[in-house]
Image (cartoon, helix red, strand yellow):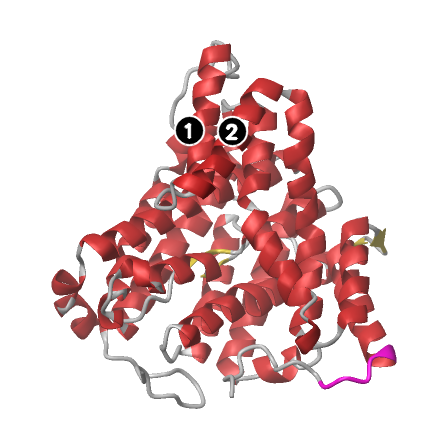
Amino acid sequence: MERTQHSDWIEKGPGFGAGLSGLREALGIKTASAGLVAAIFGCSGPALIVIGAANNGGLTEGQTVAWLLAIYGLGGVISLIMALYYKLPVTGAYSIPGAALVAGALGTFPFEQAVGAFLMAGAMVFVLGITGLIGKVMRWLPMPIVMAMIAGALIRFGIGAVTSIEKLPIVVGAATIAFFLSMRFLRAVPPVLTALVVGLVAVALTGGFQGGDAAISFVAPEFTAPVFTVDAFLAIAVPLAVLVIGAENAQAIGVLYAEGYRPPINAMTVISGVGGMLAGLIGGHNANIAGPMTAICSSDQAGENPEERYAATVLNGVLFAAFGVFAGVAVPLIMALPGPLIGAVAGLAMITVLLSAFQSAFDRNAGHQIGAFVALIVAMSNVSFLSISAPFWALVAGAAVSVLNERVARSPAVGTTPT
């Protein structure tokens, strides 16, 4: 189905008037439930990943609140803009692999340098979108190599879910069992939500809540002035921009094509760049188009009529934005949980992302298998040269090995229309 008129710059859509006027009719039980499920997914396990990254970097609670405000508040705004203007289930959130990348980088870089890198990453994505250079850039970074880098950067979260059981066996064990039972028997409920609820019950029963006499109160966001450095640009900004374009946007574009939509690729890239820059000003790593949430809101679960599924994205956007605004209350509650439970739930939340990354990285039909393997092991090694962390070197090494050793046709450039 053709929904947008493509141009060399920003695609045209039906407009906000059309989106608002049709919203009441489009919002039904199925669209509302899909939007709610997508919001629950995004506000549970992924939020714990961000909080874990903030803890690893030694951020204050105020800085953590600002980070969540940036990515959830602006992610929700992106959903509202794209859904209402294009009448498409193009859903915003943030890069979960990007949060993992930043978590590793914060061991090397001060947070103010990371914030500067967030701004530079957003500017890169914006320029690539507004100039139409995505295809030219991504032609040199085939999807298997990008996805292998993602898999290598995220694998430690999966391993962390296993090691957390040793630290807190009853709580983490119960949450893990609940996750897989829910995956098998409760298909309508996100397994990560079931794991979190069961984990909370287990913590309450075992008296494992942290904080002692500390009162739960609102924490105001604490903004961080950016500092721009070449090292942070290479180690954080470049890989983060690649993740936004090569993982989140590419996944969302593919999902929309699979569901019969014609996605506004340039607009999706531009708004992801704007979201990245605005999020950086607040202290967050990137607000952009989200692959998993777009998949939920554009699927059959959101209703039989594809023309009405954009309402699921609208509701998801409202809920995301609300979570971001009230992050000051939510963060102290989440941080009262024991660390092993946070690590376990975060690792469980990464299962589907890791599966998708490995499958895309080592699809024989896509080629670049040797380069993808090199990218995987470099990213897993967590090496750092010249103060530049492993994800950047994974891309460089994977691409170099692929060019030198593989005589196969390149996989399609990210953002190109499949034929």
Per the image, the residue denoted by label 1 is 197
Q: Main secondary structure of the magenta part?
A: loop
Residue type at the position of mark 2: Ala
Identify the residue at image location x=47%, y=36%.
Answer: 181
Identify the residue at image location x=58%, y=59%.
Answer: 356
- Give residue 362's position: percent from left, percent from top: 70, 66
Secondary structure at numbered mark 2: helix
Secondary structure at numbered mark 1: helix
First of labels 1, 2 by sequence position:
2
Q: Nearer the viewer, residue 380 or 9?
A: 380
The vertical placement of 159 against 251, above or below, is: above
Per the image, the residue denoted by label 2 is 175
Q: Nearer the viewer, residue 385 or 265?
A: 265
Asked whether residue 237 appears in the rendered view, the answer is no
On the image, which quarter does residue 256 sit in?
bottom left
The vertical placement of 213 against 199, above or below, is: above
Identify the residue at image location x=40%, y=55%.
Answer: 74
Horizontal side of residue 393 vs 209, given as left or right = right
